[in-house]
């Protein structure tokens, strides 16, 4: 298979997506994952009868997965069962009030009416506004490699390029949300969607208000058995398509000669390749895998990392019917929370608490008299002066005290426990400064600053994953793999054409 050897770095969703597509297109594909099993940040842990997803907990845009299976020649429903989540999330506000959010418009409007009657019409206007942003931006920002000028010059994109003001890029998420809602609780609720790609609602452009439309307009889903079933299904599809997958295989270097890749070094040995698809964090790759090019290293290092997180995996004895599958317990001062995280790189004093309990949908994920709690707190990326071992102890107390105040006294009910900090994310997944979502969107031009899917340094090198275009989250990461694979295949075809 002359000149069609591809080495894929990493076993995350972006790498798997790209590997499957390239194998289907006739390339010889080898995938190398440094950890004992694939999946990257989408992984699972099983602790004494309690099962946890350790990464993403909600699926949106399921059609992206459908398309990947279709392209590969498989039927998604043979492998995965998508279950609509309702309520999508249960919100607990600092004043003691509570609200269930739903993709069912009637239910959502009723919930808002009960919380803040004057904001029902505001919600309808907000959803239409968010839908307009989606309609104008989805094709160009989510489904197109925007760093490829020739692809942007398609006539169907001109409408968006000439109507950029309508995607609200000059206000922040918070400024725009505040224009719609009078109730500060609803402002806080819709502001939180900036964190879906690891950003600060007080800095990120209001264009990110596309995110709540994707959830409320298109729906949120759970994968029966847990989100990690997606990784297992893609591993099966990749293997069926001929992808060779190697685990415990750490890539140490991207090899290149005369500004063109010619392979990778894995566990001390050279693996020859005509192309490299890098699913590892692109910023880290420039520092640790690509020799030379100091200027580019300095350039990518200026990109602000996204949020990180602290995760508590708790196996809890007892049932808690007041909690739903997904829950948010809001900070009493979220302006300060984000200021501490992004401005000062400090652990927040009063973090927002997210709790996902998959045993609500899959009883087998916990013993009969227990629940599996995945608890996530927003955290800063790694910076000097942080003391994570001490912060684990402090945050554990903060969370347990906050839960107790809400009536969930679980301190004596925790049967199993595992804790992850930004240091663990950096170590386990080689993420830039422990960030979860790659690069933040805390500027008006971030969409264009996010690293491209095709390397500008080395020919034959392509990037997928949450650190590159179009961003983090399950569907976008899978789309990044599609973009990288498509560009690689186009370059191969162009190379063959020139030879003739």
Image: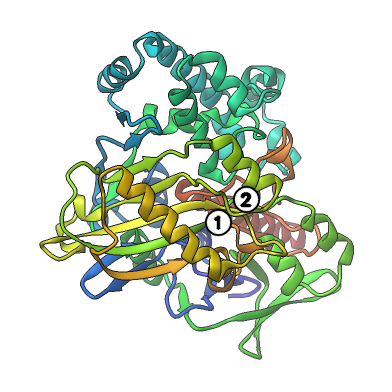
Q: Work out how far the residue at label 2 is from the one at label 1, CA to CA, in angstroms.
A: 7 Å
Could you say where residue 76 lies in the image, as x and y percent from the top left? Answer: 29, 52
State whether residue 254 is above or below residue 96: below
User: Circle 2 is placed at which residue position?
Assistant: 306
Secondary structure of the residue carrying tag 2 is loop
Could you say where residue 187 lies in the image, as x and y percent from the top left? Answer: 49, 24
State whether residue 307 is above or below residue 249: above
Outermost bottom residue:
268
Within 10 Å of disc 1 (Cα), the crowding (few <14, some 14-19, many 20+) is many
User: Circle 1 is placed at which residue position?
Assistant: 436
Could you say where residue 271 lies in the image, as x and y percent from the top left? Answer: 64, 84
| Horizontal side of residue 264 vs 457, given as left or right | left
| Horizontal side of residue 322 vs 276, given as left or right | left
Outermost left residue:
368
- Residue at screen point 34% across, 69% down: 417
Along the polypeptide, which appears first: circle 2 or circle 1? 2
Q: Are marks 2 and 1 in contact (CB under 8 Å)?
A: yes
Secondary structure of the residue carrying tag 1 is loop
């Amino acid at each position: 298979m002359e000149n069609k050897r591809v080495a894929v770095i990493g076993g995350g969703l972006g790498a798997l997506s790209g590997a499957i597509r390239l194998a289907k297109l006739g390339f010889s594909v080898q995938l190398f994952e440094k950890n004992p099993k694939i999946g990257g940040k989408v992984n699972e842990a099983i602790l004494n009868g309690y099962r946890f997803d350790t990464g993403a907990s909600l699926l949106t845009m399921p059609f992206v997965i459908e398309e990947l299976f279709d392209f590969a020649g498989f039927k998604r429903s043979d492998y995965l069962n998508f279950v609509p989540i309702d309520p999508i999330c249960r919100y607990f506000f600092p004043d003691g009030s509570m609200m269930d959010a739903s993709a069912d418009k009637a239910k959502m409007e009723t919930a808002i009416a009960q919380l803040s009657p004057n904001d029902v019409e505001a919600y309808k206007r907000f959803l239409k506004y968010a839908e307009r942003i989606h309609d104008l931006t989805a094709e160009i920002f989510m489904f197109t490699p925007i760093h490829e000028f020739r692809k942007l010059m398609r006539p169907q994109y001109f409408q968006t390029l000439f109507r950029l003001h309508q995607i609200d890029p000059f206000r922040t998420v918070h400024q725009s949300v505040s224009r719609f809602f009078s109730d500060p609780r609803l402002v806080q609720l819709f502001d939180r969607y900036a964190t879906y790609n690891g950003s600060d609602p007080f800095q990120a452009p209001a264009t990110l208000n596309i995110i709540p439309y994707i959830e409320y307009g298109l729906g949120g889903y759970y994968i029966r058995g847990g989100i990690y079933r997606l990784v297992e299904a893609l591993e099966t599809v990749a293997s069926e398509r001929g992808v060779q997958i190697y685990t415990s295989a750490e890539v140490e270097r991207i090899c290149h000669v005369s500004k063109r890749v010619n392979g990778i070094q894995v566990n001390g040995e050279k693996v020859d390749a005509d192309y490299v698809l890098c699913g590892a964090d692109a910023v880290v790759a420039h520092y640790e895998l690509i020799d030379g090019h100091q200027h580019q290293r300095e350039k990518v290092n200026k990109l602000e990392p996204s949020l990180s997180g602290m995760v508590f995996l708790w196996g809890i004895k007892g049932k808690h019917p007041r909690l739903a599958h997904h829950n948010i317990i809001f900070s009493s001062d979220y302006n300060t929370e984000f200021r501490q995280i992004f401005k000062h790189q400090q652990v927040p004093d009063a973090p927002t608490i997210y709790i996902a309990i998959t045993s609500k949908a899959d009883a087998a994920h916990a013993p009969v008299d227990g629940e599996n709690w995945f608890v996530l707190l927003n955290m800063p990326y790694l910076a000097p002066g942080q003391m994570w071992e001490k912060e684990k102890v402090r945050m554990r107390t903060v969370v347990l005290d906050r839960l107790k105040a809400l009536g969930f006294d679980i301190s004596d009910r925790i049967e199993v426990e595992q804790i992850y900090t930004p240091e663990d994310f950096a170590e386990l997944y080689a993420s830039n400064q422990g960030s979860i979502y790659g690069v933040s969107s805390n500027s008006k031009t971030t969409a264009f600053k996010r690293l491209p899917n095709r390397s500008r340094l080395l020919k034959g090198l392509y990037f997928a994953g949450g650190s590159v275009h179009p961003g983090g989250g399950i569907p976008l990461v899978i789309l990044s793999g599609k973009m990288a694979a498509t560009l690689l295949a186009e370059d191969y075809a162009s190379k063959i054409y020139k030879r003739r």
